[in-house]
Amino acid sequence: MNKITMTLQSDHLILEALKEDISSEDVSTNAVMKEAVRGEVELICKQDGIVAGLDVYRRVFELLDEKTEAEFYCKDGDEVKAGQLMGKVTGDIRVLLSGERVALNYLQRMSGIATYTHSVAELLKGTRTKLLDTRKTTPNMRIFEKYAVRVGGGYNHRYNLSDGVLLKDNHIGAAGSVTKAIKMAKDYAPFVRKIEIEVENLDMVREAVEAGADIIMLDNMSPEEMREAVEIIGGRAETECSGNVTKENISRLTEIGVDYISSGALTHSAPILDISMKNLHAIE
């Protein structure tokens, strides 16, 4: 996530998070800090994992005071260990105190997603299958959560509804059939857009292939059905499987030979990585 992306897509979201936490003033900080005092605080990892979101963490403090400085001893994607000193933040102590919780919320959440994604992606090593996220993200956190998935070794599915065509069960119901839904999508969507459709049984697989779908998502099908579906498709479309995929059960899917496995758990079920700010003190 570069500086341009941060400014255009992230700053307003970070500011809203800060406004949520500071509606008028930080009463606790203002009670003990009557004026600006330069200070330093350490960023310490309390749990093994993969770090993600350091630029977002830094940006929280910069938006409160552009003079705040952050020095990191690791970078996004690095493995970090419990007890590791990850960096230091220097600036007005009032800013360090007021921004602490919001900054850590981003860093802990994003690092947790990167850590969980990494653990799942490791299970796909040696296969041709790519691990994808979904749109099952926290409202107003999608840009951060999908970035964290990439840091952890996963890939992004479409970013939002404007990003691609994915015809799900209710779209098929609205259109009347798999064939009609695909035809309508081909007629409406720009020719550069791929058409993906979600299917739930082998009859739908056959219909999707004949209708010319570009990607066929095998949703909540058994591993045996998926294997047969891949044979039916025979390379005429890319294949994706989904449906309650987690680290605990993904092994049953690795030998099927699909192109992609998508998992909402990467973003909606990843626990945070425990990280804290400690040893705040004034400096000259």
Image: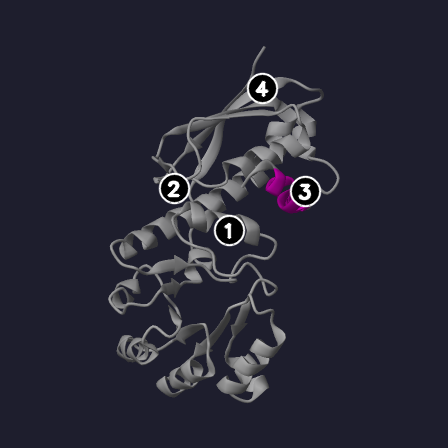
Q: Which segment is the magenta one?
A: 4-18
Colour mode of the rendering: one colour
Based on the displayed image, in which of its 4 quarters is residue 217 positioned? Answer: bottom left
The amino acid at mark 2 is Ile
Alpha carbon distance from label 4 to label 1: 31 Å
| Residue 180 placement (x, y as % from top left) | 54, 86
The amino acid at mark 1 is Glu
| Residue 263 placement (x, y as % from top left) | 41, 62
Q: Earlier in the sequence, mark 2 or mark 1?
A: 2
The amino acid at mark 4 is Gly
Residue under label 3, please give it: 15
| Residue 269 placement (x, y as % from top left) | 43, 58
Residue reaching furthest right? 24
Front label number (3 vs 1): 1
Residue under label 4, please give it: 39
Front label number (4 vs 3): 3
> Dot 4, how many residues are within 10 Å of its Cα: few (below 14), some (14-19), or many (20+)?
some
Marks 4,2: beta carbons within 8 A: no
Alpha carbon distance from label 2 to label 3: 26 Å
Q: Residue at x 38, y 88 (%)?
A: 203
Alpha carbon distance from label 3 to label 1: 17 Å
Figure check: 93 above or below 284? below
Residue under label 2, please give it: 50
| Residue 213 placement (x, y as % from top left) | 46, 76
- Residue 9 magenta-drawn? yes
Toward the viewer: 162 or 91?
Answer: 162
Callout 4 secondary element: strand
Name the quadrant of the N terminus: top right
Front label number (4 vs 2): 2
> Dot 2, how many residues are within 10 Å of its Cα: few (below 14), some (14-19), or many (20+)?
many
In the rendered view, does 23 fall on the left or right side of 80? right
